Structures are given as C-alpha cells and as structure tokens.
Image: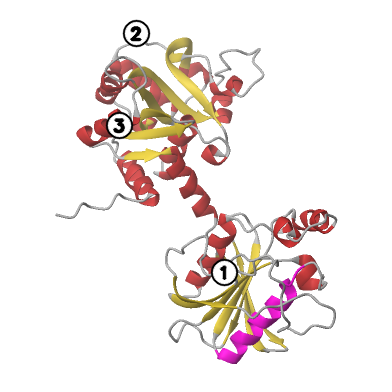
Amino acid sequence: MTASPRPNGRTRVAEATAALRSGRMILVLDEADGACRGDLVMAAECMTAEAANVMTTLGCGLIHVSTRSAALDVLGIPPADPTATGPGRDLFRVSVGLAGACGVSASQRAQTIRALADPASTPATFTRPGHIFPLGCAAGGVLSVPAYPEAAADLVELAGMAPVGVLCEVCGSDGEQAGRAELLELGRAQGFPVVSVDDLVAYRRRELCRVKRRGVARIPLPMGEFRAIGFTDGLDREHVAFVHGDPAAGRAPLVRLHFECLAGDVFGSRHCGCRARLEEALDRIARAGDGVLVYVRARSTAVRDTLRACATEGENRCAEAHPVGHSDLQSAFDILDELAMREIRLLSDVAEASLEPERVRVVERIPLSDTSPRPGAGILAPRPAHTDDRIGSMS
C-alpha cells in the first residue's frame, strides 16, 4: 500500500485555519537553530473552559494571548517591564484578569481570554495583574517577526476572526520543552492539524504576489502589434504582459519572462545584454504568431542598485543590480495564470527554473540566441559566456 503524500505548506495552512474557524485547536511548530518549539493554538473568541483545561493539561505551559501590540495599547495593558528597550518590551505585557472575577478556574480564564478578543472591551474590563498573559505582536505578523506569537495571531486572522490567538507551549513527559517527534505524535494522537511558522511565512509571502489586472492598450512595436496588459501585485508593483495573437487559444504558446533592467532596456548599456534579449524575445514571439512576454518591473531600489553595480568592476554587474527574487517569479507566473496560460514553451537562458509554477506547466524550455551588448550589434549578435544566465531575462 502506497503511503499518502505529506501535505504541502499551503495545505497545512488551509487545514489549520479551517480548524480554527470551527473552534478547534491546532499545533504550531517554531523551528529555529536546530530547536523546535510547539504551541497549542486556538482562536481567543472561541475559547471555552473545556479548551482552557485541555491546553493546560496537554501543554503544561502558561496560557498566553497574542494580539497586535497596538490593540493592547488601546486596552491599557502596558509592557511588563517599561524600562526595557529591546524587542521584548512590546512582546511581554502585564498579566490581566477579568474585572469582578477573581480566581484561576478554567471558566474564568476562558472569560478573560474572550474579553481580550471582544471589540467592546475597554481598559476598565480588566484587572492588572491577573492569570492571563498577553503578548504584543508585530503589526506585520510573521512577515515582520517570524515567531510563534505572530503566527498565532496571523492564523486566527486568516481564519476570518479578530487576530487574537490563545497559545500554550507544549512540554514533554519530562517537563522540558517537547521535541519535534513528540510534538508530531501529539498532533497525530489528538487529531490536531500541525503547521509551522515557516509554512505560514511562505504562505503569506505567496499571497502577497497575487496579481490584479489594471488595464489594456494596443501597442505597435517594430516586431508587430502587441496588447499591453497592466497588472499590480500584492506589493503594489506594476508589471506588463505583452500579448501577441491569441496565445490562450492554442497549445503551449511561446512565453518569455523579462525582468526590468533600466540601464540595459532603456539606455542600451554595454554592461549587459538585456535590451538585445528583450528585442529578440519579442521578435520570436511575433514570428511565432502567438505568445506572451511578461515584463516584471524591478523593486523600488532598482535605480540605486543599478548605479551601484555599474560603478563596480566585474562581470556580473547586471545580476548584482537586479537579483530575481521568489516573489518576482511568483508574480510572473501568476500573470500567466491570469491570462489562462496552462502550458507554455518558455524562452529561457537556463535549462531549469529556480521555481516551478503552481498552475502553469512548462512543457519545453527554449534557449535564446546568444546576444552581446557590443557597439552596433544586432539582436542576434553573439554573447560572451560570462553574461548573467538566470531564468526570465535574467537581467
């Protein structure tokens, strides 16, 4: 019997948020520097006396409530150490209880926790100190601080609730921090979905790359007429797809990913062959009859990075000025998905891509002709072997 494949990070995040949405508990792993910490997590607004009891019984650690630092400031819950100046100042807050209720019972803890997620709560709702320990999280969540308090708040928010998560660290049978194997066994035995902080970071970065269509215009180029379709991604960067013919109608149209190089594309810099590769790709797409060139705009520091790279000696100045990141590739492939490209023939500088697209299948990788930034050279001029070679324009 063949074992079922282990779910990927996106699936694990989806399973975890579905469980939180239904009021269930999950297990969040935070792995760093060879160590692994595990926390039982659930949505604060779903907290019950039974859940509080389960957390303290299975976890054996302190119950914390993580939410955005700004929300705790509004509730008048100050730092536990107001003299602190490091990152722990906002994280660790004065413990609280529910005004009018004293004691440490599971039901009273649950009431206090639910009050921390209640938008109607005010500073007068709580006594200080108490039996619940709030944690102040970064506004940007795991994308700012990839740690378990931010993960708890982010996951609850992704589940569609206020970003207030309850968490309790899991201790092992010896009373020390539980190891990874013990944590995974606990998740399996109790039926808790297990997700890691790394899974969540990758998921949130991925979602930031989602693109939206922003307009279209017909642009006649020397190679032929193209439709220029504008897109923005989750980082508010603007990109353009140059579409020739009707590539969605046929099977595996010709596609090129070109990453912006201001010095090369616009001014024809001799430091790189970016402009020649751009022109050749457009020409080959036009001659093929159907195809797409996705022009991925550079990050906001592109001009500064270009000037710095051009001022240095060396053969990889273009690569240094325009490193192609994970989000750049994701945005490019998302644009192809938006254009209904399911199978493509990719005009590439290398045999393999550094990222396999999720919904677009590369059926063939076709190398561009060698191009070199020589004075008077045409678009099919030879290119020296040291020119930067990365997927897309590899500029």
Q: Which residue lies at the image location 71% right of the left edge and 75% below the top edge?
A: 383
Of marks 1 and 3, the one in the foreground? 1
Q: Which residue is mark 3?
A: 181
Q: Residue furthest left?
A: 1
User: Which residue type does callout 3 highlight?
Assistant: Ala
For this view, does 313 lie left or right of residue 209? right
For this view, does 135 lie left or right of residue 294? left
Q: Can you tell which mark lies on residue 103?
A: 2
Res. 283 visible in picture:
yes
Q: Position of residue 215 (x, y in %)?
A: 62, 73
For this view, does 329 lie left or right of residue 175? right
The residues tagged by marks 3 and 2 sit, at their Cα atoms, a distance apart of: 36 Å
The question of residue 287 being in magenta is answered with yes
Tell me which segment is drawn in magenta. 272-289
Q: Quadrant of the C terminus?
A: bottom right
Q: Which residue is mark 1?
A: 350
Of marks 3 and 2, the one in the foreground? 3
Q: Residue furthest front?
A: 385
Of residues 234 and 382, the one nearer the viewer is: 382
Of residues 12 and 154, the one nearer the viewer is: 12
Q: What kind of element bears circle 3?
A: helix
Q: Position of residue 354 (x, y in %)?
A: 52, 60
User: Which residue type does callout 1 highlight?
Assistant: Val
The question of residue 127 being in magenta is answered with no
On screen, 129 above or below 114?
Answer: above
The residues tagged by marks 1 and 2 sit, at their Cα atoms, a distance apart of: 66 Å
Of residues 26 and 275, the one nearer the viewer is: 275
